[in-house]
Amino acid sequence: MTVLTLARPWLIADLGQEMRVLSFAPWRPGFATARRILWREVRNADLTPDLDVDRWFAAEMAGQGASGDVGMLTSRDIGRHFTAQAEVEGIAVTCIATVGLGNAETAGARRATAPAPVGTINLAVVIGAGLTETAQLEALTIVAEARTAAVMDSGLRLGNGARATGTGTDCIALAARPGDMRFAGLHTALGEALGRAVRQAVAVGAEDWMLENGRVADGYPP
């Protein structure tokens, strides 16, 4: 059972046991064995041009006793996190999402300059089944697909009228036990549960962000 703790500036997901986490998180990316996934809330002013972010984040994680865990960075208010769960044929999936869209992009194009304020989508997804490494890689693609679908469903537009498909700094951390399950595609029970949980959590988070900020991401050249 995943237990969430909000202790600003940290949001901490305790997985209840060590699991194999696959991510492209700034701290311990790739395949890593970890018990916790952490979000560190930051502000633009915190990340000055002369800051060595890697060294700074390493020190922050160490200060939390989390050097052996997986860590992500977000400028979204970590109090505005959303959790969705789905279970299909006995396979349970939990998705915890922080959704900021100030850094929105559309696939196949990019902004000429970095937008401000920065915002990103950070997801921690926990699977209640044992997977092979290959299945976990496939599961990561389903998470990314569901996130993109939720962002597109939200109707967020960039300043040039293009529909947003995500942000320039999205991050996904996917946790599962090592096991024998070999497939995680959309035809599988796991794929269905993944898509449902992720799509719901991101959709709620995107709507929450747009209620605060509007349905157009400013700063994109027309």
Image (cartoon, helix red, strand yellow):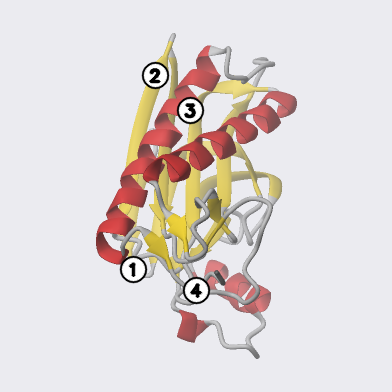
Query: Which circle's residue, 4 or 2, is located before the other in the chain?
Result: 2
Query: SS of the residue at dot 1?
Result: loop
How far separated are the C-alphas under marks 3 and 1? 29 Å
Residue at image x 50%, y 41%? 147
Mark 2 and mark 3 residues within 8 Å of each other at the beta carbon? no
Please identify the residue farthest to the top as the structure is shown: 89
Query: Which circle's residue, 2 or 3, is located before the other in the chain?
Result: 2
Query: SS of the residue at dot 4?
Result: loop
Quadrant including the C terminus: bottom right
Which mark lies nearer to you, 3 or 1?
Answer: 3
How far separated are the C-alphas under marks 4 and 2? 40 Å
Task: Give the residue pinned by disc 2.
Answer: 87
Q: Amino acid at mark 1?
A: Arg
Which mark lies nearer to you, 4 or 2?
Answer: 4
Numbered badge on residue 195 = 3
Quarter of the view holding residue 218: bottom left
Task: Give the residue pinned by disc 1.
Answer: 8
Which mark lies nearer to you, 1 or 2?
Answer: 2
Give the answer, above or below, for where 83 lies relative to 209: above
Q: Amino acid at mark 4?
A: Gly
Mark 4 and mark 2 residues within 8 Å of each other at the beta carbon? no
Q: Position of residue 143 (x, y in %)?
A: 55, 35
Q: Position of residue 10 (x, y in %)?
A: 40, 64
Q: Position of residue 38 (x, y in %)?
A: 48, 56
Q: Is residue 192 left or right of residue 174?
A: left
Numbered badge on residue 219 = 4
Q: Is residue 172 left or right of residue 55?
A: left
Bin the neighbour count of mark 1 within 10 Å (Cα to Cα): few under 14, some 14-19, many 20 and up.
few
